[in-house]
Amino acid sequence: MIIVRTSTFSPLLCCPWLANQKNNHEHPLRSWIFPSLHLYRFIVYSVYPGLIFLEPKKIKMDSLLSLVEGLPPSMSQAPLVLGAVAVVGTVFMVVWASSSGSSQQQKKLLQEHNAKRIPHVFSMIPYVGSAIDMGKQGVTAFIRKNSQALQNSPLFTATIVGDKCVFLADPQLLTMVFRPKYSRNLDNLTVQKDFAKTVLTMNSQESDQTFDKNLNKVSSKQYHQFLFKGEELERSITSVQETFHRDVMPSLVSNETEWTSHELYRMVATAVFKATMGPVVSQAFSNDECYELLHNFDKGVIPIYNGFPEFMTRPARDARDRLLDLLMSDDSWKTASPLFQARRANLGISNAALSKSNLGLLWASVGNSIPAIFWMVLLLTEHPEAWETCRKQVEQVVASRKKADSNRTVFTLDELDKLTYIESAFWEALRMYQANFTPRTATEDFIFETGSQNYLIEKGTKIMVWWNVLHSDPGVFEKPEEYRFDRFVGKSKTDFSFADGKPLTHEPVIPFGGGEHLCPGRKFVSYEARLFVAMLMQNFDIQLLAGETRPETDPAMVGIGVSQPTRDPKAQIRYRKTV
């Protein structure tokens, strides 16, 4: 589960190698370059903070520094020389980033496969490239606009903060990163290790333990055992419901008859967090203090990953350290979930590595489910007819219970499977608000076959899969800009097709990754979402406050999972009068 949420991560303009270079003080111009790098990075991040998935090309800065080393120290103080070095370095980076290479191996691949190079979108802004345009337009509009400008090319490259990135504009091509034919030439493990090091504070030994192939196989089996199917999944979902009834429901209303006001996102977040912690982590984490710690940590994940100064990320770092302490505590292990107990017994890694890995699991377990369920509840609340249709189905399922079970308050998995309208509303919310990049770095030159044309993917290129290209495609979804809570009722992937009439060979909504990185917790999250909404509908009335509107999505979180709102809309809730 760590892999799933963090598969989109890698640094924006973070150059940790630079700080470790020897003799950094030897040349005076270095004192200009280092702070300029940090300033440049902050400027780009402030324009489009979602660009956290790109890594710097070391060769570019090495080459720029080599220019510095060739200058006499006295000359480096001259503004004219400084400007000249900046111009030369900028020209070099632009040429380097836009060049497509011409190795003999590439020429051979092009000839043998009758392939061509991918068209490139040029930008006049050095190094930053098209990043600002993408931030201003929005990723989907950026991809479609440039595809049309290149005669409806199904893919194109663009320079994004120094990286040459491939953007796929044809929704039929998106799943290429999961196909074994291509995935063997693509890497994302480096990104995960960087995240574990910078955010979870793993050292090299702990990282090697955590990312061992055999250990990952054991972890995957454990996730499937406890979160995917069978009795353990049923037990986990039952635990969620018990927590909801025992700890969450009493806190939602202040009395039996009156409306109680809440900030909707926070209400959903605290409820989902508390209900998830018991079956996934430990009952010791099912409280407000741990939610606040995770909330503070979550806000600082992107800045920490991008190497922001400690004074700017101190609250997040403190929250992370406190969570790690709690994960290692005896109280935590006394009420640890079956999953965590199995990890402790069978993974065979150090306590430090286990705690840091568990922190990643804790973060990933609610990092996307909370905003997904929030949008689901908000959209249903905005559409009373949708809410009532879903509620009637809940009542029908409850009424169909045998007389001996008529007083049972716990939904079974079979009953949740019958809540097809709520399940459809869940997928529709994900279709509209999942904002995830799946990036992969090409480890070798290889040929990508689109069906109509073969293209050369160059080593070192980043392939940027943006799933909204599929989720908002009018060829796949009728009026994709509209919210339709019942869009997926009674339908499977065979009921959807692309604009050219070809049927989908995969699910119409892809929020959980794919291939070997397909989220093992996807069934748990789907059931949890249906359960939470069903229990709300069964027990409460809820409505937005007068004049309240749907918030925009937070651009700072674009690219790393389900979108989060820019503000927290206010709602009111009360016990159902008919209950």
Image (spheres, rainbow, N blue to C red):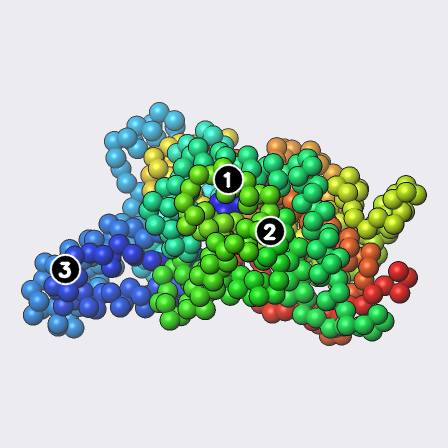
Residue 562 place in picture, x, y as percent: 58, 54
Callout 1 amino acid: Ala
**Residues at marks 3 and 2, CA–CA distance in whole angstroms:** 52 Å
Task: Indicate left or right for 277 with 304 as reference.
Answer: right
- x 34%, y 34%: residue: 445
Of marks 3 and 1, which one's residue comes earlier in the chain?
3
Question: Pointer 2: what residue?
Answer: 335
Which residue carries the number 3 mark? 23
- Judged from the image, the secondary structure of the residue bearing numbered disc 2 is loop
Counting from the top left corner in percent of width and height, residue 299 is at: 50, 64
Picture layout, residue 234 above or below residue 257: above
Task: Estimate the x, y position of residue 183 in percent, counting from the top left.
Answer: 44, 34
Identified at 7% across, 64% down, the residue is 72
What kind of residue is marked 2? Thr
Residue 24 lies in what quarter of the image? Answer: bottom left
Badge 1 is on which residue? 345
Of discs 3 and 1, which sits in the foreground? 1
In this rendered view, identify the residue nearer to me: 316 or 393: 316
The one of 253 and 63 positioned closer to us in this rendering: 253
Classify residue 422 as left or right of residue 146: right
Question: Tag 3: residue type?
Answer: Asn
For the point 50% across and 34% down, which residue is it?
218
| Nearer to us: label 3 or label 2 | 2
- First reached walking from the N terminus: tag 2 or tag 1: 2
Q: Quadrant of residue 502?
A: top right
**Residue 95 circle label:** none
Is the Cβ of the residue at disc 3 closer than 8 Å to that at disc 1?
no
Q: Does residue 181 show up? A: yes
Q: Quadrant of the C terminus?
A: bottom right
- Numbered-mark total: 3
